[in-house]
């Protein structure tokens, strides 16, 4: 079920510029970024509260988090190499993978 909620937030120019920069960094519109932040805030962050949720709800929240992570990763890959965030995947790109020795 989807619900539409319209919210008005008064921001000064510096706050709006900061939000727009963060949205651009993640490859999102300002509206998409704000929606992602609100969605993240609405999810339980306490591990005990999360474990207390029904299995179906935990699975739903984990799937949403995986979707968010995939979108952020794709947005990061779209950036020029020098501007990408360091991730295990991008830092190993083209580098040999060394196996630990016993």
Image (cartoon, helix red, strand yellow):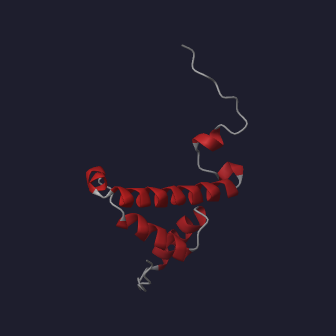
Query: Observer-nearest residue: 92 or 22?
Result: 92
Q: Is residue 15 above or below residue 77?
A: below
User: Residue 78: percent from the left, percent from the top?
Assistant: 69, 58
Classify the position of the N terminus by image quarter.
bottom left
Q: Please state if 73 lies on the left or on the right of 19 as rendered.
A: right
Whole-percent x, y for residue 38 in the image: 41, 70
Q: Is residue 42 left or right of residue 97?
A: left
Tally of marks: 0
Quadrant position of residue 75: bottom right
Out of 37 and 5, give the one closest to the viewer.
Answer: 5
Which is more toward the observer, 12 or 1? 1
Q: Residue at x 57, y 56 (%)?
A: 70
Measured along the vertical axis of the image, is residue 24 above or below residue 82? below
Residue 66 visible somewhere in the drawing: yes
Expressed as whole percent of the image width and height from the top left, the position of residue 67 reads: 53, 59
Report whether 82 appears left or right of 20. Answer: right
């Amino acid at each position: 079920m989807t619900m539409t909620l319209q919210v008005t937030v008064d921001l000064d120019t510096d706050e709006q510029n900061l939000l727009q920069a963060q949205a651009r960094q993640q490859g999102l519109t300002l509206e998409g970024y704000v929606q992602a932040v609100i969605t993240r805030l609405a999810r339980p962050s306490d591990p005990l509260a999360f474990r207390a949720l029904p299995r179906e709800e935990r699975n739903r929240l984990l799937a949403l988090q995986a979707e968010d992570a995939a979108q952020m990763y794709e947005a990061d890959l779209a950036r020029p190499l020098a501007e990408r965030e360091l991730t295990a995947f991008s830092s190993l790109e083209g580098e040999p993978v060394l196996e630990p020795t016993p």
